[in-house]
Amino acid sequence: MEDFDELSLEENHRLAIAYWNDGNFFPAHEAWESCWKQSKGTDEEELFKGLSQLGAGYVHTRRLNHHGAKTLLRRGLSRVERYLPERAGLDLRAIADAAREHADEVERAQEAGESMPEVTPPSV
């Protein structure tokens, strides 16, 4: 994995999108976490923090961790929704709609004592 802290915000954002679209949510999360740190004090700080949390939420779906998945998807969603409908070249409405649906599915499965539902995150 790249040393994201050594890269520019723009390069980290580009890499995060590429990793996400390849289904590699952990490095996407890490790249957007670096974007978040690099954008502290700007208007996009919460956007990148939210995207990072969504990436982590999808990591938890793959690890079959209901609590981690629903919690991080909802946290990320609460931040990303502030920037609807689009920002930073992303269709945030589609991302937010999918994250909300997935968090709800995971929560319903957890409450019913069922296994992790299969979720397909949207391409960004």
Image (spheres, rainbow, N blue to C red):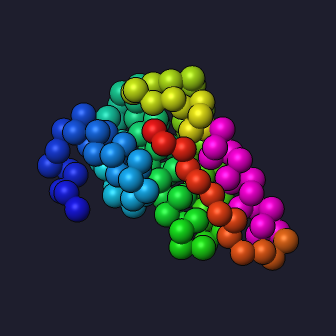
Quadrant of res 94: top right
Magenta span of residues: 97-111
Q: Position of residue 9 (x, y in %)?
A: 25, 37
Residue 95 vs residue 48, the one in the foreground: 95
Q: Residue at x 41, y 48 (%)?
A: 21
Q: Main secondary structure of the magenta part?
A: helix
Quarter of the picture containing the N terminus is: bottom left
Magenta span contains residue 49? no
Q: Position of residue 69 (x, y in %)?
A: 60, 62
Q: Position of residue 4 (x, y in %)?
A: 22, 52
| Number of marks in picture | 0
Is residue 19 shown above or below 86?
below
Residue 46 vs residue 8, the one in the foreground: 8
Q: Residue at x 53, y 58 (%)?
A: 58
Magenta span contains residue 100? yes
Is residue 57 visible to us here? Answer: yes
Residue 41 vs residue 15, the one in the foreground: 15
Q: Residue at x 68, y 45 (%)?
A: 100
Quarter of the picture containing the C terminus is: top left
Q: Position of residue 97 (x, y in %)?
A: 66, 38
Is residue 111 shown above or below 38?
below
Q: Residue at x 19, y 57 (%)?
A: 2
